[in-house]
Amino acid sequence: MNSTHKTKNSARLFDAAKKVLPGGVNSPVRAFQAVGGTPLFIREARGAELRDADGNRYIDFVGSWGPMILGHAPSRVVSAIKARSAKGTSYGAPTELETELAEKIISAFPSMEKIRFVSSGTEAAMTALRLSRARTGRDKIVKFAGCYHGHSDALLVKAGSGAATLGIPDSAGVPRAVASDTIVLPYNDLAAAEKFFKDAGETVAAVIVEPVAANMGLVPPVAGFLEGLRALTKQYGALLIFDEVITGFRLAYGGAQTLFKIEPDLTCLGKIIGGGLPVGAVGGRKDIMELLAPLGPVYQAGTLSGNPLAMAAGLMTLEILDDMNPYKKMEAATEKLCGQILAFAQWLKIPVQVPQIGSMFTVFFSDAAVYARFFHALLEHGVYFPPSQFEVCFVSAAHNPIILKKALKAITQSLERTSHA
Ligand code: KE4
C-alpha cells in the first residue's frame, strides 16, 4: 500500500512536460485522460515492479504495453544491451545480429520465409498493407472495428454508415480518399465478412486482423472466425495479415497462429521481439517479401531498422523465452488470478467480466467511470493497471506467486473501494 500515495513529483514533472510535449506525453494513452488524474512519471523498474518519481512502488500489469514479458530489466538482456552498446549503437550498415534474430523468429513462425525489421508495429502494419497492394494489384483493405494496427493513415479509419460502405477517417489529417479504401467490419462476425466478400471480394488486397483483439480490452476470436477469414481470403485471392504485434511470442513462442494452427500470408510483429527497445517486423511468404526494395518494386526503408542494440535485446529475450518456455506457468498463474478476481467481484455483486487468454486479461466493468475508480484505488494499493478500460493487462514471467498474492490482495481491496463508491 502506498500509504500517502504522494504524486507531487509526478505532477511537477507533468507540468514541465506539458510545456514542451503535446499533452505532456509521447503517446496519448499515457496521459491518463481515460481515467483522470496525473500520469505517473516512472523513475525505474525491475522485475514486476515499477517505482515512480515520488518513490511509490507498483506491481506492474502494463509491462510497457506488452514487451516486458520477462519483467523489467532482466539481467541477461541488460548485459546484452550494455555489451553491444560498447561496440557502437548504430552503423546504418548490415550486422550479423539482424540475420540471427531473423533466423530465430522464422524458426518460431513456419508461415514466415523472410522478414524485414522496422522500428515500430505501425511501420510493420503499414509495410504489410503496401506489400499486399503490390502483390495483388488491388487497393481495398479490410480491418475490424476495435482492432488497432498503429497510426498509419490507411489504418486510422472507422466504419462508414452500414457495414459494407467504405471507411471514414478516424483521425483528423487522414484524407477521405485514403480512408475510403479501407472497409471496417465487425470483429468476430464472419457472416458480415462473407457478405462483404461476396459483393466485393475481388477488390480486396488484404484483410488485417488481430488474431486475439487486445485494443478494445481483451476479445478472443470466436470459434471459426479466423479459420473463416483464412478460407475467404484464399477463395477471393486476397492476403491474410495477422497483426501479432501483441500476441507474437506472448500467447505462445510461435504466437497466435501456432496456437490456432492458421497460416497467414503476412505477419506483423513488434514489442517482445525488441526486448523493450524499438523494433517491429513484417514477415511472410518469399513471393510477397521479395517484392521489397532493393529486390523488388515496393519501397520501404529505415535509418534505425535492425538497430544492433535492439537486435541484441530482442535476441536475448527470445533466447530466454525459448530456453525457459514460461508460457504454461504464466497462463496458469493468470487463469488463477482472473478466477479469484471474478469470484470476489461476484461476491461483492459488482458486475464484471474477466476475459483471459494466456498471460493477457482485462477486467471489464459496467462503464469506464467505474473502471477509472478501480484504477485509482489500485494505484493507492500499489498496483498499476492500464490507464484505459480498453487495453489489456499482462502477467510476466517475473510475476511470481508471492507478487500475485500481494496483487490479489490489492485488487480485492480496490474492488471493495469501488463497490462502496
Ligand atoms: P507501435 O507502433 O505502437 O509499436 O505498434 C502499433 C500496434 C500495432 N498492432 C497492435 C496489435 C498494437 O497493439 C499496437 C500498439 N499497441 C498499443 C497499446 N495497445 C501501444 C501503446 C500506445 O499506443 O502507447
Image (cartoon, rainbow, N blue to C red):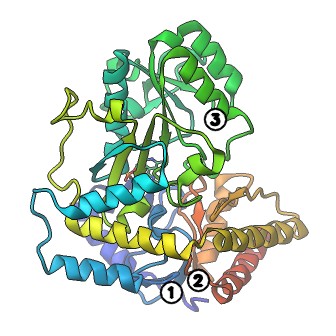
Residue pictured at 21% horizontal, 66% vertical: 308
Distance from Cα at disc 1 to Cα at disc 2: 6 Å
**Image quadrant assignment for residue 252:** bottom right
Please name which of the two marks, 3 or 2, marks the residue nearer to the observer: 3
Q: What residue sits right under mark 2 in the picture?
A: 382
Q: What residue sits right under mark 3 in the picture?
A: 226
Q: Can you give x and y, in whole percent of width and height, for residue 124 in the image?
A: 35, 44
Residue pictured at 48% horizontal, 42% vertical: 111
In-image side of 182 versus 187 (left or right): left
Task: Name the foreground residue: 220 vs 15.
Answer: 220
Q: Can you give x and y, in whole percent of width and height, for residue 206 in the image?
A: 45, 25
Q: Which of marks 1 and 3 is nearer the N terminus?
A: 1
| Element class at badge 3 | helix
Q: Which mark is residue 57?
A: 1
Q: Which of marks 3 and 2 is nearer the N terminus?
A: 3
| Element class at badge 1 | strand
Disc tally is: 3
In the rendered image, the residue lying farthest to the top is 199
Q: Earlier in the sequence, mark 1 or mark 2?
A: 1
Query: Residue 397: in sight, yes or no?
Result: yes
